[in-house]
Amino acid sequence: MKNNVLVVHGGGPTAVLNASLYGVLAQAKESDRIGAVYGAIGGSEGILKERFLDLLEFAGDEGKKLLSTPGTAIGSSRYALEEEDYRAMEPILRKYGIRYVLFNGGNGTMDACGKLARALGTDSDIKVAGIPKTIDNDIGITDHTPGYGSAARYIARTTAEVGADVRSLPIHVCILEAMGRNAGWITAASALARKNKGDAPHLIYLPERPFKEEEFLEDVKELYERLGGVVVVASEGLKDENGTPIVPPVFQTGRSVYYGDVGAYLAQLVIRKLGIKARSEKPGICGRASIALQSPTDRKEAVLAGREALKAAMEGETGIMIGFERQPGEYCIRPIRIPIDQVMLTERTMPETYINDRGNDVTEAFAAWCRPLTGEDEPDYIDFQEIYRKREEGRG
Amino acid sequence: MKNNVLVVHGGGPTAVLNASLYGVLAQAKESDRIGAVYGAIGGSEGILKERFLDLLEFAGDEGKKLLSTPGTAIGSSRYALEEEDYRAMEPILRKYGIRYVLFNGGNGTMDACGKLARALGTDSDIKVAGIPKTIDNDIGITDHTPGYGSAARYIARTTAEVGADVRSLPIHVCILEAMGRNAGWITAASALARKNKGDAPHLIYLPERPFKEEEFLEDVKELYERLGGVVVVASEGLKDENGTPIVPPVFQTGRSVYYGDVGAYLAQLVIRKLGIKARSEKPGICGRASIALQSPTDRKEAVLAGREALKAAMEGETGIMIGFERQPGEYCIRPIRIPIDQVMLTERTMPETYINDRGNDVTEAFAAWCRPLTGEDEPDYIDFQEIYRKREEGRG
């Protein structure tokens, strides 16, 4: 008898969320035990409303489009499931012959995943597994999450490009705002833009450290006087020493936070307090939807996570999330199965060893950890201004 | 006797500004009459300070990096030249054996170009020519300017990606802010993101039409109720019916304007007046520095403009700017030489025929004009939500 699979997406998308869905389809296609792979259309609400589409017919060439489709092809939701919702799911799953339920999402979705696994019980013949996904990289235990590598590559490349732009006409301070909620992982990845001394980013501010306005202004002033053009990368989630956001969120409903414009606020601060020209850029969700700056490593790992989750469920595992364990030596990860109660609603932020003492930069340890995730083939710019400067120095 | 060339960059960069510089180098290399191609380091100030670097040694493989280097490799400036500056230039040019001066920039730079040509006089053996460059596409006479095609491709692709993201989790209004100063050309190009009915962008607001808050809120409300997720693309330069910017510029010095955050303002308006969740994205200068989203057509034409400017100067032309004339039929442009006084400080905005009646969208005539400039190979996304919806409709 064939068994069916159900895939559910939760929360906001990443550049490789659909790549994990492709991984599930590819794995299912290789098995003769799978009858249908249902996508829950519109997230967990889609389960309760029985909005199911069998995706297995798209496992071939048409489905390969999933690798380069941003967003989520089956939709998502932020619907907060209640106790009774979990109980209501079992008869629906049985009605559709679903034996394997795969939740793909962040720590909120892993919470739902764990609760459904608990409601069904470990002895149930219906198995539930989680596929991690978040640009924020704030899920515990796993070395990193699918989606983060692409967000990191986006911010690194964008910082390098904005750096080249600002260096061309060095007359202002440019604040680049990065996503990541309460975790600085994305913001920190901007450091990978540096190739030569003096390259952007010149300052990096993370939500893990209280933001000190005076130190920020001191640092900006000193750099502006020296370089003319300064690039600052600041996290949307910056807080002051009391833990209060430096810009109040626009609004907040449950786990969904719409952050205030931190970049615009800091630019205004530079203008008002230092009298220096400043502007801000806030690519925002452009950075989690960019296919051109998808990390090839991230995409490969996202496919792997989808495959491994189905494999685990078919092997009888339930209440687990797939994670990555980094191997010693040259970059290599091994997929692992993490008991889901270890990651439900945890929020992993950056460790102190990845942040410099002054709290305005990251350490080389962070860069070494992050670099392979971006699959970065470093851009190779030519800078005649720098060549001229060096020749003049040689003459002087 | 060999003659030398001087290239000067003015104003903000584009994604293909350095490609035009490459074009000048490639053209110079093919001639046995050129001795050196000096780059004025740091824009027109670089002329007065005699900050010159001979770039001809980089005309080979190393110089090819110019094609994918954002910003300007020789630097730029916003230095406002005075009458005496133009008079001071001739002895400097003669000292370095410079016979051909090429200014690469927008309408402000073309003004400088024209003034130097006038100061030298048409009979002078020193010839001055302009290479157009602006993401804003606001230079007169020419069909379009190098730099615009890439900015258009960036906004089109980004709108498609943000559209896929918002459609995945359709719970808010997303305002994407586009650059372009007083001209809506870039904002308008977002329309190229549409492939199927209902695709983003759902509303487009251009500075050519007075922004009417009430109509905007009406349109957003109707779309939100119908779609759940709405993508609005708004120009940084939006003005009300009195011509006052809807958000005051952060500051303005001469021709340099730092626009206020129009996207953030409109998002706040949606939240406050309609009680609908909204957020804004402002990629800003990321959109003029993106190499991944460079238009191949734009890059090719930028190289051509550089080549043609040197060719014109070597043929004895002075006080002209290279422009593009579009040929009838399949997309094809012909380089033309435009008397520079026709483009000095003009500002070309979008014609009425490119804007719809309500002023919240562009016309198909605009899209047909714009499409070939982006060199767009359309992204091909897969959308299971849409497939599901159509199947349900078929059943219902």
Image (tube, coloured by chain):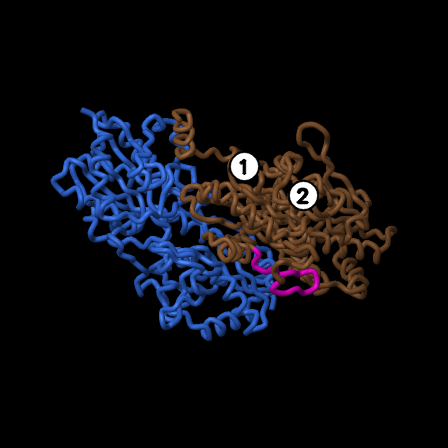
Chain colours: A brown, B blue
Q: Quadrant of the C terminus of chain A?
A: top left
x then y, percent, for residue B273: 54, 74
Q: For the magenta stretch, what is the residue range? A: A249-262
Disc on the earlier residue, 2 or 1:
2
Count of labels in the image: 2
Give the residue furthest to the left.
Answer: B123
Q: Which mark is residue B199?
A: none
Left or right placement of residue B76 versus residue A377 in this view: left
Q: Is residue A253 magenta?
A: yes
x then y, percent, for residue A41: 65, 59
x then y, percent, for residue B234: 45, 62
x then y, percent, for residue B83: 22, 48
Q: Which residue is mark 1?
A: A194
Type of residue at label 1? Arg
Label 2 marks a residue whose chain is A
Question: Hey, which quadrant is residue B103 in on the image?
Answer: top left
Residue placed most toward the observer, A143 or A96: A143
Type of residue at label 2? Lys
Residue placed most toward the observer, B223 or A168: A168
Q: Which residue is mark 2?
A: A29
Q: Secondary structure at mark 1?
A: loop
Q: Is residue A39 above or below residue A23?
A: below
| Distance from Cα at disc 2 to Cα at disc 1 | 43 Å
Label 1 marks a residue whose chain is A
Which residue corresponds to the image point at 81% horizontal and 64% vertical from the top-left? A83
Q: Residues within 10 Å of mark 2 (few under 14, many from 20)?
A: some
